[in-house]
Every structure is written in structure tokens, then in C-alpha cells.
Image: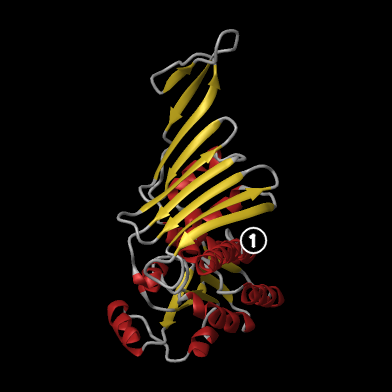
Amino acid sequence: MLKIGLLGAGHLGKIHLRLLKNIPHYELVGFYDTDPETTRIVEAETGLKGWSSLDRLIDACDVVDITTPTLNHFDGASRALKKSKHVFIEKPLTTTLVEAKSLMRLAEEARVKVQIGHVERFNPAFLAAQAQLINPLFIETHRLAQFNPRGTDVSVVHDLMIHDIDIVLSLIKANIRRISASGVAIVSETPDMANARIEFDNGAVANLTASRISLKNMRKSRFFCSDRYISVDFLEKQVRVASLQDGLAADQASFHLDLGEGREPKHILLQAPEVQPINAIQMELESFATAILNNSRPAVPIDDGYAALEVANKIVEQLEWNANFAARTINEH
């Protein structure tokens, strides 16, 4: 059994604490939070020990689960890795690529496992669609959320869009040729709405939209392959597939496609793969325990977290360049 401790007992941290209690591979030894009042409340709610010393909690663990604000990821993770502890870190990995690279080096030196909390990899709808997602050529995503000040310590790209960036990079194994982006800051100091277009060397394209000031929540992605279209609703946990088949339609779940005179008949088969009732956060934490115990590669290793952060940073750089260019143009006129 792996002794695990949690850093950061905020909203997400409390969810992790509740789930960790029910995972047989872990022995939850307690948590650490910088706020004494939060510590007192969570102790009373969970019956767990709130440690007064971060380093002492790390010393008592085999695994450290980090759900602190992104600005504190590097400090907690680096301390744990220097003590040769396995580390689970919520997304995004860190605030800078320099910090991320440093953590990668520390993890390699310590020979421990690190997994990044890109939880949508474990979304039951995405898992149900996996068999259909073969070499997508075009991906379109919409991740819209109602305003919540809890995530405004980072831009909407690092807060929301990075989920879809990770999904895209997990499916398209090709170098990125070009990134273009536009966005606007409305209620915070960093962009609250953004759109990015990512073009790959193999011809694939991803068009990503994220907003944290929407009237309703939406987490939908559409994947276009050479012979099929897959719609994944990450929020409602639904999958729809329309695939091109040879021959005439055989049942009500398909319809005839007229390709013109002299061409072989084809039809579109409509499917709704079954989505299992899975708790994605619990599954990702369980998968990390399995990777440690079996000495196997984590489902979302640290280099995947680095890759997603690198693309997110490039998108933010493009947004900043566009904003500065617009400001210069206005001033000139």
C-alpha cells in the first residue's frame, strides 16, 4: 500500500481527499494547506490530519498529490521529488517551461513517477470514443464555462483550453507547423475568451475555443477522420459516431448516400457507443497507483504535461502579440 499525502485542500483538493479514501492502493496520511482556517475546517469535515509542516508530510509519504494553485506547483513538486517521492500534479504542470523542465530533470534523477492531472483523458465519453479516434484530420473543440473567480490566477488557455490541447496532442502524433490565436480579456487581467488554430506537419488541423464568461457550460469536441465523424460531449458524457460504409443502408441506424451515377453505393452508419459510469478523477488516481506498483509508464506522464504547457504558452504569446499590435495600431491613429 502506498502512503499518500495531499498538498492544497481547496475545492479540488477536498474532492481528491474524498476519493483517495476509497482507493485500496493508497493509505491517506493527511494533507497540508497554507491556510490555518482551511486546515481546521477540512480536518473537521474529513477526520484527516492537517499537517503543520509541508516537509514533514512529504517525509511521511510515498506519493504526494498536488492540488494547490498553479503558482505553487513547482515548490511542492520540487520538494517532493528531491526527497524521491512519486508526484501527482494537477494541470497545468507549472507556470513556466523552465520550472517544468526542472521538474522533469528532478524526476529522472530520483527515478520516480510523475503524472499530470489532465483528467479529460479519463472522461468516460472520451474513453468510449477511443476505438473510433483513428488519425483525425480535423478537430474542433468548444470548452465554455460560466465565470468563476477561482480559476483566474491563469489565462483561460491554461485554465480551460489546456484540457483540449492535451487531448489533441494525445491523438495527433506529428510536429506542429504553425499556431495562430486570438482572444480578449474582459473581466480579468488575462484573456477570458480565446480561439487557437494549430496546424500539424501531417496536414491535421485543430481549432480550439475556450471561454470562462459564457452563459452556459459546454465541453464538446468534434473529430473528423477520413471515413468517420465523432462527436464527444465531455460534459454530458455522450458519444455519437457517423461512419462511411460500403453498400446500401441495411437498417434504420443508417442512411443512403447518393454519390452519383456510376459510383458504388455507400451509406452513413450512425452509432452511439455505450459510455460507462466512471469517476474520471478516481480513475486517474487509481491509474497512477498502478503505474507506481507495476513500474510502468503513467497514463499522462510529465513529458505530456510539458508538451501541453509548451503549446499553451505559445498560444498565450500569440494572444499577447496580437493585443500589443492592436494597441500600437490604435495609438498610431
Observer able to see residue 121: yes
Q: How is the image coloured?
A: secondary structure
73 over 285 or under it: above or below: below
Whether residue 3 appears in this view of the structure is no
Nearest the eye: 294 or 182: 182
Q: Which residue is mark 1?
A: 296
State the residue at coordinates (38%, 20%). 252
**So how many labels did they put on this image?**
1
List x then y, in percent, for residue 278: 40, 52
Amino acid type, residue under disc 1 in the picture: Ser
In the displayed structure, 80 sits above or below 117; it is below
Q: Which sits in the foreground, 53 or 49?
A: 53
- The single residue placed furthest to the bottom in the displayed view is 52
Vertical position of residue 165 compared to residue 272: above or below: below
Most distant residue in the top direction: 262
Toward which corner of the image does residue 215 lie, by quadrant? bottom left
At 43% from the left edge and 79% from the top edge, which residue is drawn? Answer: 8
Neighbour class for label 1 at 10 Å: few (<14), some, many (≥20)? Answer: few
Viewer-nearest residue: 136 or 311: 311
Q: Secondary structure at mark 1?
A: loop
Q: Quadrant of residue 301?
A: bottom right
Residue 258 position within the rendered picture, expressed as x and y whole percent measured from the top left: 50, 15
Residue 74 x %, y %: 56, 79
Give the image quarter of residue 303: bottom right
Q: Position of residue 138 (x, y in %)?
A: 57, 41
Residue 2 appears left or right of 271: right
